[in-house]
Image: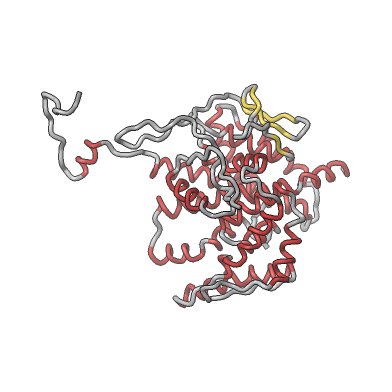
Amino acid sequence: MAALGSPARTLRGLLRELRYLDAASGRPYRDTAAYRYLVKAFRAHRVTSEKLCRAQHELHFQAATYLCLLRSVRQHVALHQEFHGKGERSVEESAGLVGLQLPQQPGGKGWEP
Amino acid sequence: MRPPRPLGVMWRICPRLRDRGRGLLNRPSSDPTGSMWPRPTPRPPARAYVPPTERKRFYQNVSISQGEGGFEINLDHRKLKTPQAKLFTVPSEALAIAVATEWDSQQDTIKFYTMHLTTLCNTSLDNPTQRNKDQMIRAAVKFLDTDTICYRVEEPETLVELQKNEWDPVIEWAEKRYGVEIGSSTSIMGPSIPTQTREVLTSHLSSYNMWALQGIEFVVAQLKSMVLTLGLIDRRLTVEQAVLLSRLEEEYQIQKWGNIEWAHDYELQELRARTAAGTLFVHLCLESSTVKHKLLQE
């Protein structure tokens, strides 16, 4: 069966992801609708003592999927910023890569306005 | 006849997605992963590469409200609309909250390429390629002919072993669960899927509604495998497991030759994000009725 781990761990991971996200809106993460919904859903389904409760497993799977979504989006954006987000180098920097310098012409280049 | 092209295709800012979207649009069947957002402004002519102007975050608060068609998203006081200017409504509260969280998590600029759930909802609401249920089911079942986990290599030996150990159990599970024959093959023509298998799967898929089918097609396009998608929908595999199985050969090569963070990890996280979004979308579109029942019984 799916290796989901314990629901407590998934919940903790979700709360951590929400904490990372709240830097954007500035509001504490406990205010968000997502936090309230998750806590309510986890509490409601915790009551059953039966280990093989199907609804519990369904909810846990959905929560784990959402956690995977939040985590991978955050890491994807971080990787993008680090490796692909910088744009192109300027001409000066490109020349500097191979140890060259652009010539300086005090009178300006002939074709520039 | 070819379905009409989606209007105002905007190549997402991420260059990798740009190529992928263009390549996939050449197929007659539509690609729901192609972005449907209109371009904000034309790109200014410049000598260095300047990214197209990005929309800044123009709202402070995101909230959801319940309308007559379902749940709606409010950005400040404005209601969110789809690219074709329809009102954005979703049937499930959990889905609405997840979409609202996506919009709320944008800092400074809005990165549409990270908002997978929003894109899926927009595609389902707009249906820009105007396909009906039969076309979608046919396209999904057709994928079995080129299913990743049915396509086996013949060498190197260790990879053959790995494919057998990891992929065979999933195929067996699918065969048992649906009572069909799938099998695997090493020939270049791919596995030969018997008609009975196709029929069984077609009738199974037609029990899902249009929204769930959009999600299923999205996941199939990401994982390049119908069997793995079935495993995800039936909760036999987690997203991480399904992605690993889909990328089995890549992982094998990474272990052998080394990992390149800016390519391998980048693609892995992107694939995980999209697969997770698709799976969550399918499950949330399916089970809105069951949740209500449980609450009523208490």
Q: In this view, does B106 lie above or below A45?
A: above
Instruction: Find residue B245 and report its horizontal and vertical position in percent.
Output: 56, 63
The residue sitting at the top extreme is B77
Please say whether residue B165 is visible from this viewpoint. Answer: yes
- Asked if residue B155 lies left or right of residue B287, the reply is left
Number of labels in the image equals 0
The residue sitting at the front extreme is B1
- Asked if residue A68 lies left or right of residue B70, the reply is left
* A59 and A7: which is toward the camera: A59
For the rendered model, the colour scheme is: secondary structure
Quadrant in which the C terminus of chain B is drawn: top right
- Asked if residue B264 lies left or right of residue B60, the reply is left
Instruction: Find residue B284 and report its horizontal and vertical position in percent.
Output: 71, 46
Say which residue appears at 36% left-offset and 34% top-offset.
B50
* A12 and B145: which is toward the camera: B145
Instruction: Find residue B206 and report its horizontal and vertical position in percent.
Output: 75, 56
- Asked if residue B68 lies left or right of residue B99, the reply is right
Please say whether residue A3 is visible from this viewpoint. Answer: no
Instruction: Find residue B90 and report its horizontal and vertical position in percent.
Output: 71, 38
* B2 and B255: which is toward the camera: B2
Q: Is residue A66 above or below residue B51?
A: below
* B154 and B256: which is toward the camera: B154
Say which residue appears at 37% left-offset and 31% top-offset.
B44
Say which residue appears at 70% left-offset and 32% top-offset.
B72
